[in-house]
């Protein structure tokens, strides 16, 4: 008998996962078939199904006016429909749940759950059954099997069930590899495996921005404001359960996403994020006292912390994402940092007022400083210019009280301070250090 053998590759869908297998098709020219060339059938059958939450069943209400030809026929049919809500038949949502009709989407941060079943379709007793499930990603291969021990025997029409769970932490292509090995009653060892391929998508688009809040009354390491922009790039709404910032060991964080005495969320009680909507979260980070006192500790690139985002989707399915450590380039202050610890908001015209300057050595060498005060068009300094401040060690600071007055009304900038290092003969100029509002205390009475 002459036979013609053809090998093809096809995709077979079992429940909801796509199985990629190779099948050898043997097509004889006559009615007789050469059994030796036929593909050997296994005694066990493997079934894999993804476990997901169901969805609410939706109706499409069809109505008409009473004077139309159908009359109350449509209304009567909707009232008799078991899937509608009694007394609210016009709502699209019903009282029933719908099981998943396809594989659906898997997003980064969600938990992938799958049901694996191995059934003995034969009339023989199979022994030493070992079921192994691995998940292959672009960077690693993970073993998801709950038990790696073999089952002693499996009687006909019996099955081995297992449920696997895995929190998805990578995007891209994932392949679930299910392998089954067993021994027949005649001592023959058989083995087969199947591959289930699926894609993991990105649910959120997270962007961050840093703002340096350098003020006149700040310390050497100022506060930092972090703005986190979170966009829902899925096709369904999300309930944002938690968006928090876990600071690094150098910072304390304050969330600025609430208002009022009741600390209510600025986004309202129902914190839903619709598809393609973006929401901004704001946080204030302040260096801890033990780090803020040391000028040279927080320099260059510093680790701020990481965002922890938790959301829920259909029927409470939870997802969670944690960003990598957020880094911020600390502002450079040069060799010497000059800031103001005390300064009034409002002063009177041509009346002296006091300020306290804080001078910090940000370099790695000792400095011998001299303070010079230069008058400007509106700001006039009181006291002796060229005062010796003495030596200042690295990371040390010095508080210097000064007196000045303004001869011009309005918002005036304090400028004209000069620090000279006698060791290197280098002069550091400080202008526009702060601003003060100058008002006139005298008012003319109109007669």
Image: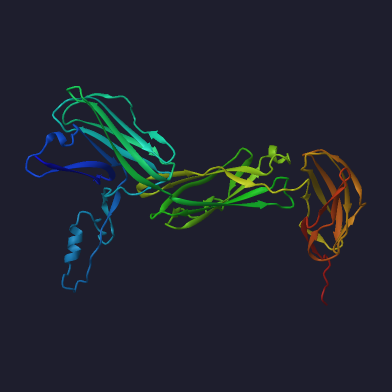
- The residue closer to the viewer here, 301 or 194, is 194
Residue furthest left in the image: 31
Quadrant in which residue 366 is drawn: top right
- The residue closer to the viewer here, 342 or 107, is 107
Can residue 266 be spotted in the picture?
A: no
Residue furthest front in the image: 2
The residue under the point 80% across, 57% down is 431
Can residue 446 be spotted in the picture?
A: yes
Q: In this view, does 285 lie to the left or right of 344?
A: left
Quadrant position of the C terminus in the picture: bottom right
Q: In this view, does 83 lie to the left or right of 308?
A: left
Q: At which x and y percent is residue 385? A: 91, 52
The residue under the point 28% across, 48% down is 100
Q: At which x and y percent is residue 62? A: 23, 65
Residue furthest bottom in the image: 447
Q: At which x and y percent is residue 190? A: 23, 28
Figure colour scheme: rainbow
Q: Is residue 315 left or right of residue 340?
A: left
Q: Vertically, is 149 above or below 404? A: above
- The residue closer to the viewer here, 390 or 77, is 390
**Number of numbered discs overlaid on the protein picture:** 0
The residue under the point 22% across, 70% down is 64
Q: Vertically, is 32 above or below 93? A: above
Q: Vertically, is 249 above or below 354? A: above
Q: At which x and y percent is residue 441? A: 82, 65
Quadrant position of the N terminus in the picture: top left
The residue under the point 27% across, 31% down is 180
Quadrant in which residue 94 is drawn: bottom left
């Amino acid at each position: 008998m002459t036979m013609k053998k053809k090998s093809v590759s096809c995709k077979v869908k079992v429940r909801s996962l796509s199985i990629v297998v190779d099948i050898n098709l043997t097509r004889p020219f006559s009615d007789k078939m050469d059994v030796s060339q036929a593909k050997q059938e296994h005694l066990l059958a493997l079934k894999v199904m993804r476990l997901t939450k169901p969805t609410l069943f939706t109706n499409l209400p069809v109505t008409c006016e009473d004077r139309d030809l159908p009359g109350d026929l449509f209304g009567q049919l909707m009232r008799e429909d078991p899937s509608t809500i009694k007394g609210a038949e016009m709502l699209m949502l019903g009282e029933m749940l719908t099981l998943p009709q396809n594989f659906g989407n898997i997003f980064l941060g969600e938990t992938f759950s799958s049901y694996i079943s191995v059934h003995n379709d034969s009339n023989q007793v199979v022994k030493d059954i070992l079921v192994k499930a691995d998940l292959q990603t672009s960077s690693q291969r993970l073993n998801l099997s709950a038990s790696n021990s073999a089952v002693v025997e499996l009687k006909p029409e019996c099955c081995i069930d297992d449920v696997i769970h895995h929190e998805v932490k990578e995007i891209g292509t994932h392949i679930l590899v299910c392998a089954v090995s067993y021994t027949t009653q005649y001592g023959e060892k058989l083995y087969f495996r199947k591959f289930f391929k699926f894609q993991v998508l990105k649910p959120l688009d997270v962007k961050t921005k840093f703002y340096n809040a350098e003020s006149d009354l700040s310390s050497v390491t100022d506060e930092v404001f972090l703005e986190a922009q979170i966009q829902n790039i899925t096709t369904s709404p999300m309930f944002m359960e938690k968006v928090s910032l876990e600071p690094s060991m150098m910072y304390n964080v304050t969330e600025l996403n609430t208002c009022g005495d009741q600390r209510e969320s600025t986004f309202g009680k129902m914190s839903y994020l619709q598809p393609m909507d973006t929401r901004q979260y704001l946080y204030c980070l302040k260096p801890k006292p033990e780090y803020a006192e040391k000028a040279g500790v927080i320099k260059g690139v510093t680790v701020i912390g990481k965002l922890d985002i938790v959301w829920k989707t259909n029927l409470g399915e939870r997802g969670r994402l944690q960003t990598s450590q957020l880094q911020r380039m600390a502002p450079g202050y040069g060799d010497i940092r000059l800031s103001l610890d005390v300064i009034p908001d409002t002063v009177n015209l041509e009346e002296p007022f006091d300020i306290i300057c804080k001078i910090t050595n940000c370099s790695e060498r000792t400095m011998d400083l001299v303070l010079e005060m230069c008058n400007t068009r509106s700001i006039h300094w009181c006291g002796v210019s060229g005062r010796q401040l003495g030596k200042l060690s690295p990371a040390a600071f010095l508080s210097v009280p000064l007196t000045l007055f303004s001869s011009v009304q309005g918002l005036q900038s304090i400028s004209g301070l000069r620090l000279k290092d006698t060791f290197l003969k280098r002069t550091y100029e400080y202008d526009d250090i702060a601003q003060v509002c100058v008002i006139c205390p005298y008012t003319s009475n109109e007669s």
